[in-house]
Every structure is written in C-alpha cells, then in structure tokens.
Image (cartoon, rainbow, N blue to C red):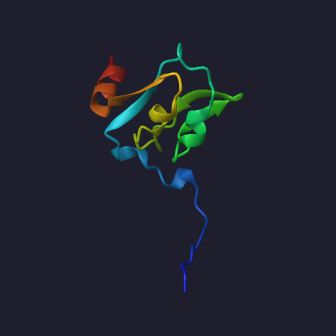
Amino acid sequence: MGATIPESGNADDYETGGWRSERPLRDIEKCNDCMICFFACPESSIRVENDKMVDFDMKHCKGCGICKQVCPRDAIEMMNEIKACKLEEK
C-alpha cells in the first residue's frame, strides 16, 4: 500500500515554468522586500539574496499570480508571457 519514490529529486530536475501564460513583474520602487511573496509562492520561484527579493526564477514560475495576490504594496503585476518576451527582446 502507498507509493514508492525511487530517488529524491530537486527543482533543477523538474522545471515547470515552460508552460505559463503570464509572468510576474516586480516594481522595485514599490517593493519593500517584505518577503510575503516568497512564503506564498508554491514553486519557490522567488530568488532571494541577503534577505531581499532579487528576481523570479522563470524556469519554475508557473504564472499562477499568487505572489501578486499576496503583495501588500501592489508591487507585482502579471504580464502576458508573449508581451513580456517581446519587451525583453528590445
């Protein structure tokens, strides 16, 4: 009864960000690094250095928008993935 996990995995082996339709964008001016988004993100896609948010890990972000929902300062917005990619190309 039950299941067997033959070997442990990690997030590097299971990238989940390839199929999102929206991606989070952070407004650095509004963000106060409260880290609520870090604790709320189900994919652990918030990159942190020195106790401050530095970026989103797009290899794992599914674009669920939970980070936006929990942000008390409206510092995160969700943008259509195609539009975001076009902005990055410029």
Q: Quadrant of the C terminus?
A: top left
x, y percent for residue 79: 34, 28
Q: Residue at x 45, y 32 (%)?
A: 68
Eyeballing the image, is 5 above or below 49?
Answer: below
Looking at the image, the residue that sits furthest to the right is 50
Q: Looking at the image, which is closer to me, 80 or 70?
A: 70
Q: How many marks?
A: 0
Between 14 and 72, the residue placed more toward the observer is 72
Q: In x, y percent, where is residue 18?
A: 37, 45
Relative placement, left or right, of 77 versus 50 is left
Question: Which part of the image, by quadrant, shows the N terminus?
Answer: bottom right
Question: On screen, 31 above or below 80?
Answer: above
Q: Residue at x 57, y 73 (%)?
A: 5
Which residue is at the far front?
Answer: 72
- The residue under the point 52% across, 55% down is 13
Q: Nearer the viewer, residue 86 or 33?
A: 33
Residue at image coords 43%, 49%? 16
Query: Residue extending furthest top?
Result: 29
21 relative to 64 in the view: left or right: left
Where is residue 85 shown, x and y percent of the image? 33, 28
49 or 31: which is nearer to us?
Answer: 31
Q: Give x and y (percent) for residue 37.
A: 55, 35
- Report the residue that reaches farthest toward the bottom: 1
Q: Quadrant of residue 21?
A: top left
Quadrant position of residue 55: top right
